[in-house]
Amino acid sequence: AYVIVRKLAGTEHPSVIVLYFPMVCVPSALLLGFEDFVWPDSATVWVLLGVGCFAQLGQYALTRAMSLDSASRAASLSYVQIVFAILLGLVLFGEWPAIFTLIGAGLIIAGAVINTLIKLPQRIP
């Protein structure tokens, strides 16, 4: 998917690329999930709207990043979201991560820093 997004980013605006995902997923979800659908209460609707808005913003930012750098480099930085999830779990829910989770988060941060600092020579397309 990242390679396809990188290829499309050369000719299409990131908003167009991001728009096509819900255009495919919503009808598919309606067809496949119709039998098990449960109406959410009003609080859940607001949570779902918030998640949807932030997911669209995140997807737009990732698509924009794909248009500016290689797919492998931009995709490797997406693992930083795990670190943010750990921090949100700690702050919002008081969940203290296990030692191996902290080690993994440290490795992710180290990889992101190395990925940002090291510039590899560009291959000719």
Image: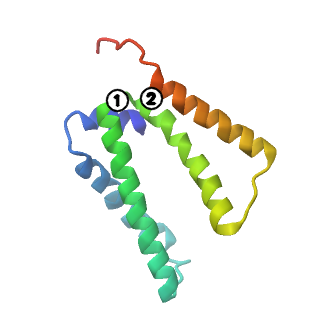
Tell whether 14 sits left or right of 74: left
Specify the quadrant of the image occupied by residue 19.
bottom left
Cβ–Cβ under 8 Å for marks 1 and 2: yes
Query: Vertical placement of 25 versus 16: above or below?
Result: below
Query: Vertical placement of 59 versus 88: above or below?
Result: above
Q: Position of residue 106 (x, y in %)?
A: 66, 37
Q: Nearer the viewer, residue 101 or 5?
A: 101
Tell whether 117 sits left or right of 36: left
Find disc 2 in the rendering and name its residue.
73
Identify which residue is drawn at 40% across, 31% down.
71
The label shown at residue 69 is: 1
Identify which residue is drawn at 62% across, 55% down.
87
Give the amino acid type for the residue marked by disc 2 in the picture: Arg
Specify the quadrant of the image occupied by residue 8.
top left
- Circle 2 packing at 10 Å, graded few (<14), some (14-19), many (20+), is some
Q: Quadrant of the C terminus?
A: top left
Q: Quadrant of the N terminus?
A: top left
| Residue at the bottom extreme of this rendering | 42
| Secondary structure of the residue carrying numbered label 1 | loop
Give the amino acid type for the residue marked by disc 1 in the picture: Asp
Identify which residue is drawn at 30% across, 33% down.
68
Q: Nearer the viewer, residue 29 or 122?
A: 122
Q: Position of residue 7 (x, y in %)?
A: 30, 32
Query: Vertical placement of 12 versus 114: above or below?
Result: below
